[in-house]
Amino acid sequence: MLFERQALSLINRIPLLRRLGPSFLRYLLVGGLGFLVDAGLLELFIFLGLSVYAARGFSMTLAIGATYLLHKNFTFTDAAKPAKTSAQAAGFVACQLFAAAINYGVFCLLLAALPGGFIARMFSLCCGVGAGLAVNFVLLRFFVFPRGK
């Protein structure tokens, strides 16, 4: 509770963040958890013998699945209730796939340009995640979890 009050105080001091509202902070928290799932599974799948590209495809897919319920029940609590949850889930997957294409494209481009190893993988992963972040939030906020009336 204390952390949330401090974060909201920070949000209110920055005009762009104030316009995005507290759901953006919650989005970042859930995204951080999704990132940990993604990065942890990426390394696990590489350890198990998958190529880095296949491992990232699997880790990203599982991270997307892990974040849906958190976004639905924590991030966008002010969202209008959908007529059909299945339609909302399908919209979520469509937005995630679009953002994931950006994320994965940046990841692959940087990974190909950098020397191999853990640091290059994590740098490429962070840049990919960052590239998809803003696009993903806007799509989720306005199309999948629009504010209720």
Image (spheres, grey):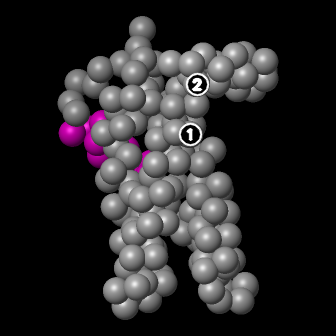
Above or below for 3 versus 61 = above
Give the number of the mark in front: 1 or 2.
Answer: 2
Single out the residue that lies furthest toward the top. Answer: 149
**Number of callouts in the render?**
2
Q: Residue at x 42, y 8 (%)?
A: 149
Q: Position of residue 1 (x, y in %)?
A: 50, 18
* Stretch in magenta: 86-96
Q: Secondary structure at mark 1?
A: helix
Q: Which residue appears at 40% of the width and 69% of the height?
A: 41
Three-letter amino acid code of the residue under disc 2? Phe
Rendering coords of residue 54 (x, y %):
41, 82
Residue 119: quadrant of the picture? bottom right
Task: Give the left or right position of residue 37, taking residue 8 as reference.
Answer: left
In the picture of the structure, the residue carrying the numbered disc 2 is 3
Q: Is 95 contained in the magenta span? A: yes
Q: Position of residue 47 (x, y in %)?
A: 40, 85
Residue placed most toward the observer, 31 or 78: 31
Q: Which mark is residue 28?
A: 1
Residue type at tag 1: Leu
User: Could you say where residue 92 lies in the image, as x and y percent from the top left?
Assistant: 37, 44
